[in-house]
Amino acid sequence: MTNICSLNVSEGCTIEAKAYSANNFAEAKYGYLKLNGNTVWQASFIGDYPNMYGANIFVVDMSTCTLVESRNYNTYADATAASRLRGFIQGLSDGTVLVGVSGDEASIYLGEAEATLAGLGADVSDVGYRGAWAFAAEIGDPSKTVLDKELTEASAMARQPIITTSLEGT
């Protein structure tokens, strides 16, 4: 059963994001970001797309519903990735729409960014090894954040986190 979390702020921009995790069963898993139904980013574990380890972060322009910026922070293998992620988020202006999608394994070196993510309304500090998460947030208003997560490899294997939200254009 697919669990879709949704928050309908108003019409204008529909964001759908799906996270994926690695697994010990050599089963392909796919993640993506869609804006108004159009796929703007794809990744996979042993699938057809590159494996984007860690935290994948996207800035979305609400007025045009387009992808402005895409960044990958390899919090699986890079001990400095979380501090860079934290700095990036802290440098964004209030009102900026941010989408986050974990890929493969994101928890090992995420610690330094967890408080910043929680401040957005995306608390993923309880997500363990090969768990998965996806969120959409508006900087400065954590009440609008939509978050879906699976805490373990087994639960992420059974159900990949997915969020769908509509955000107002400006």
Image (tube, rainbow, N blue to C red):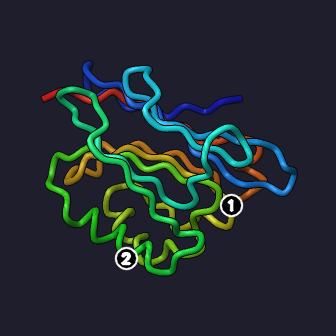
Which residue is tagged 1?
130
- Return the residue nearer the eye: 47 or 104: 47
Residue 84 x %, y %: 35, 72
Q: Quadrant of the C terminus?
A: top left
Does residue 160 lie above or below 87 as drawn? Answer: above
167 left or right of 63 in image:
right
Please give the name of the residue rendered at 44% of the width and 79% of the height, measured from the top-left corner.
80
Element at label 1: loop
Extreme residue toward the right, this view: 25
Q: Residues within 10 Å of mark 2 (few under 14, many from 20)?
A: some
- Return the residue nearer the eye: 162 or 40: 40
Q: Earlier in the sequence, mark 2 or mark 1?
A: 2
Residue 120 x %, y %: 32, 57
- Return the residue nearer the eye: 159 or 65: 65
Residue 53 image-quadrant placement: bottom right
Spatial CA distance of label 2 from label 1 is: 20 Å
Residue kind at label 1, given as amino acid type: Arg
Please give the name of the residue rendered at 19% of the width and 58% of the height, measured from the top-left corner.
92
Q: Residues within 10 Å of mark 1 (few under 14, many from 20)?
A: many
Element at label 2: helix
4 left or right of 20 in image:
left
Does residue 2 lie above or below 55 as drawn? Answer: above
Which residue is tagged 2?
83
Residue kind at label 2, given as amino acid type: Ser
8 left or right of 125 in image:
left
Residue 131 x %, y %: 65, 58
